[in-house]
Image (cartoon, rainbow, N blue to C red):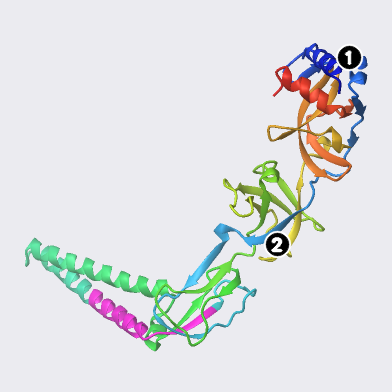
């Protein structure tokens, strides 16, 4: 380009005064000289983005681990990975040498509590008749209270284990499901010796599943909490509930979780699906990909207005080599610039544009 022509072009651009911070005042003749060409927006047929890979996972608040209530040996594990179990279903059977002692402690606590209650009731009668001092009554009431506490503790211990007194005496313990669940992982096998609190099974509530997406940072920036996702090929929907704060070091992706809205679906934990982000179809438009202007990590389109052009921020829903589907505060009745956008961008940024 000749220096004289370049200087003339710069002077011409400098003469263009923006009406507002995001507007560019330019006449039709000037637009033609800059090679600017407009095209009409087309209403998008769909309000969904390009598909993203997603994995079905259990909700963080719908997954738990079943642990051994006492030390013992695993006798049998009558469930398989992926199996759905009902509430109170048998999960693991244990044999424990500690159970008979726990059963005996409960029996002893029950006898001691009954004896202490008898002494307390007798002393209450004697005190009412004036035959014993009040101090002796208080001592018997304190002893009865201590015996009751010891009995409650012994009962609670067996209750936490989920075993009856008869089962404790036999040294047998069956761990049962506290609620309807799906078995995700068997962490103990028959014949294995376990200690108290060792993990036995990992379970998940099949009614509380989520989609896990790992999106590049540039794509994750377009996602917002409460955005709706559609599982491709189904009518299953999910709502974005969590967007990761940081990006993975190796992949530079952001983890996004979306909770499935239906409690009963054919999806299973670990399954891979394709998901699309839903947007308001009334704000989805199709245009030539050359209309997109990138600046400061955001995407803009120059739309025709009475005074010239206006820069409008948009979100790209889908894009291929020729066209892009965008969403934003665009006027479907006005055309957008699809050629010469570099000159418009230079004017926009040089005169107070964002």
Instruction: Evaluate if marks 2 and 1 touch, with contact meaning CB atoms under 8 Å apart.
Output: no
Residue 100 falls inside the magenta stretch: yes
Q: How many marks?
A: 2
Say whether residue 101 is left or right of residue 55: left
Q: Quadrant of residue 20?
A: top right
Kindly identify the residue that appears in the image at 73 percent across and 50 percent down.
229
Q: Of residues 10 and 318, which is closer to you in this image? A: 10
Does residue 286 appear in this view? Answer: no
Q: Nearer the viewer, mark 2 or mark 1?
A: 1
Label 1 sits on a secondary structure element that is loop
Quadrant containing the C terminus is: top right
Say whether residue 193 is left or right of residue 341: left
Tag 1: Cα neighbours inside 10 Å, few (<14), some, or many (≥20)? few
Q: Which residues are magenta?
A: 91-114
The rendered magenta stretch, by its main secondary structure, is classed as helix
Label 2 sits on a secondary structure element that is loop
The x, y position of residue 166, in whole percent, is 40, 85
Residue 103 falls inside the magenta stretch: yes
The x, y position of residue 122, in whole percent, is 16, 71
The vertical placement of 126 against 61, above or below, is: below
Quadrant containing the N terminus is: top right
Q: Quadrant of residue 330?
A: top right
The x, y position of residue 186, in whole percent, is 56, 76
Does residue 217 appear in this view? Answer: yes
Residue tagged 1: 27
Residue tagged 2: 264
Say whether residue 107 is left or right of residue 183: left
Q: Mark 2 or mark 1: which comes first in sequence?
A: 1
């Amino acid at each position: 380009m000749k220096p004289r022509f370049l200087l003339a072009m710069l002077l011409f651009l400098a003469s263009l005064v923006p009406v507002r911070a995001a507007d560019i005042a330019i006449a039709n003749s000037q637009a033609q000289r800059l090679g600017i060409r407009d095209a009409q927006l087309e209403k998008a047929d769909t309000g969904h983005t390009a598909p993203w890979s997603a994995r079905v996972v259990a909700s963080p608040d719908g997954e738990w681990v079943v642990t051994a209530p006492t030390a013992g040996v695993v006798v049998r594990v009558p469930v398989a990975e992926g199996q759905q179990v009902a509430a109170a279903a048998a999960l693991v059977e244990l044999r424990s040498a500690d159970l008979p002692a726990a059963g005996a402690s409960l029996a002893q606590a029950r006898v001691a509590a009954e004896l202490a209650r008898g002494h307390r009731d007798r002393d209450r009668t004697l005190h009412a008749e004036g035959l014993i001092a009040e101090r002796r009554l208080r001592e018997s009431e304190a002893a009865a209270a201590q015996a009751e506490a010891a009995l409650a503790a012994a009962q609670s211990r067996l209750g936490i284990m989920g075993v009856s007194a008869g089962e404790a005496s036999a040294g047998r313990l069956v761990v049962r499901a506290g609620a309807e669940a799906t078995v995700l992982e068997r962490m103990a096998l028959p014949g294995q010796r376990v200690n108290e609190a060792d993990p036995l099974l990992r379970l998940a509530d099949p009614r509380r599943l989520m989609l896990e997406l790992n999106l590049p940072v540039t794509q994750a920036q377009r996602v917002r909490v409460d955005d709706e996702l559609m599982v491709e090929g189904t009518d299953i929907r999910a709502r974005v509930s969590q967007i990761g704060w940081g990006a993975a070091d190796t992949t530079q992706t952001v983890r996004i979780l979306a909770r499935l809205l239906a409690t009963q679906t054919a999806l299973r934990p670990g399954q891979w699906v394709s998901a699309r982000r839903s947007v308001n179809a009334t704000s989805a438009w199709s245009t030539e990909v050359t209309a997109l202007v990138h600046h400061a990590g955001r995407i803009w389109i120059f739309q025709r207005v009475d005074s010239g052009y206006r820069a409008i921020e948009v979100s790209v829903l889908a894009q291929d080599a020729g066209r892009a589907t965008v969403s934003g505060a665009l006027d479907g009745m006005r055309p957008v610039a699809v050629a010469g956008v570099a000159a418009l961008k230079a004017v926009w940024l040089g005169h107070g544009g964002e």
